[in-house]
Image (cartoon, rainbow, N blue to C red):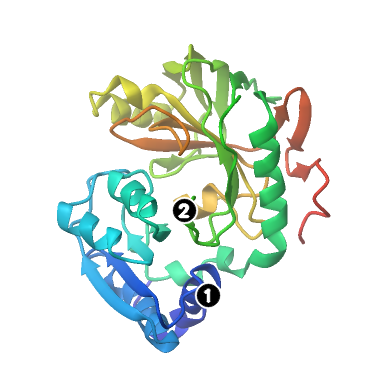
Amino acid sequence: MGVVPAIMKLPNARKVVRLLGGAVPEMEVLILHDPFTASNAEPLAIAVSEVGASLTLVQAKPGGHHGSQLSAVAAASMKAADLIIAPMRQNVAHTEARREAQAAGAKVICLPEADAEDFFLAPGWQADFEALRPKIDAVAAALHEAKTARVHSSLGTDITMSIEGRRGRSLNGFANTVDISAGYCLEASIAPVEGTAEGKIVVNASIPGVALIEQAPVEIHYEKGMAVAIEGGAEADVFRKLLSGFDDPNVYNLGELGVGMNPECTLDGTMLSDESVWGGIQLALGTSAPGGECRAAAHYDTVLTGAVLELDGQPVFDGDTLLIETGDRPS
């Protein structure tokens, strides 16, 4: 796609700043970007200026992969801000700088893969964030209250894990000091207890940041919480080589269980959309989601569709059907 004028990006940039970020004049707002995302930092900066908040832009060197650690200068800037909006090529959600900034009281909106000119034109931005919020909160509460989780599908997925004592996370888009916002990437998720996942997953949809699954499903076998085999076609080969290249055994940890909850999203090969597909199950390898204990060199989600999520033996999602009492599925 050619250059998209800033005026076309502004409506959804304003949504990020005003609705999701809650920016007000007395706030210190930091926009953290890289050389590849500068054109999408611009409409965010305009939107911040419109609300009268104090604005700082920091351009950082992009990391080599999702979860690459940020520089000390970038980390210090984040800790000094009230609201951080990070349109970056790589995801900063699983960085120490993000953790430290939120511990210091900052709200964080992570916008990975924001180097595309049409980033602010994605269909996911049309979600009814306010209507979806209680639904996502309810699924997060169900995760929080459960002791065990099971995911199974007709393709052969069947994996169980303990989630006892872990905090259910509502990534409903609204920035806060506890969990990140990832823009229109809407999900409920949790960090499984390390060492407890047993079974097999058959990834039929996407490995965000790696590839859409187009040839053969990727089968990942888990024992004692760690992936012990990755099998399949070309996508499996790419993923297996990627993980082995980190030379870190912790990248095989089952670090996150989640479910996508944005009905506007489809599988398109981007992280924010693929991880948000309504009813899509996420099972991530590497660094544990917040509340977990494992730190790894990277964090990569895998996305399954047409699967069933059970909590303590009770179905919560069956494919794209939400089965707990939170209201009707949004149209």
Residue 91 visible from this viewpoint: no
Q: Which mark is residue 180?
A: 2
The disc labelled 2 sits on which kind of residue?
Ile
The residue positioned 33% from the left and 63% from the top of the image is 115
The answer to whether the residues at label 2 and label 1 have Cβ atoms under 8 Å apart is no
User: Above or below — where is 35 with respect to 142?
Assistant: below
Residue situated in front as seen by the camera: 36 or 47: 47
Q: Label 1 amino acid? A: Lys
Q: Residue at x 49, y 15 (%)?
A: 222
At horizontal 67% and vertical 66% (from top left) the residue drawn is 130
Q: Pointer 1: residues within 10 angstroms few (<14), some, or many (20+)?
A: some
Q: Nearer the viewer, residue 196 or 223?
A: 196
The disc, 2 or 1, on the residue closer to the chain's N-terminal end is 1
Give the camera-side residue of 227 and 117: 227
Q: Which mark is residue 187?
A: none
Single out the mark in the foreground, 2 or 1. 2
Q: Residue furthest top?
A: 223
The residue labelled by disc 1 is 15
Where is the N terminus found, in terms of image quarters? bottom left
Residue drawn where x is 28% and y is 24% of the image: 244
Label 1: state its secondary structure. Answer: helix
Q: CA distance from mark 2 to mark 1?
A: 16 Å
Across and down, in percent, residue 206 comes to 50, 40
- The quarter of the displayed image where residue 330 is located: bottom right
Q: Judge whether 143 appears above or below 5 on screen.
A: above
Asked if residue 209 lies left or right of residue 62, the reply is right
Q: Is residue 36 left or right of residue 151?
A: left
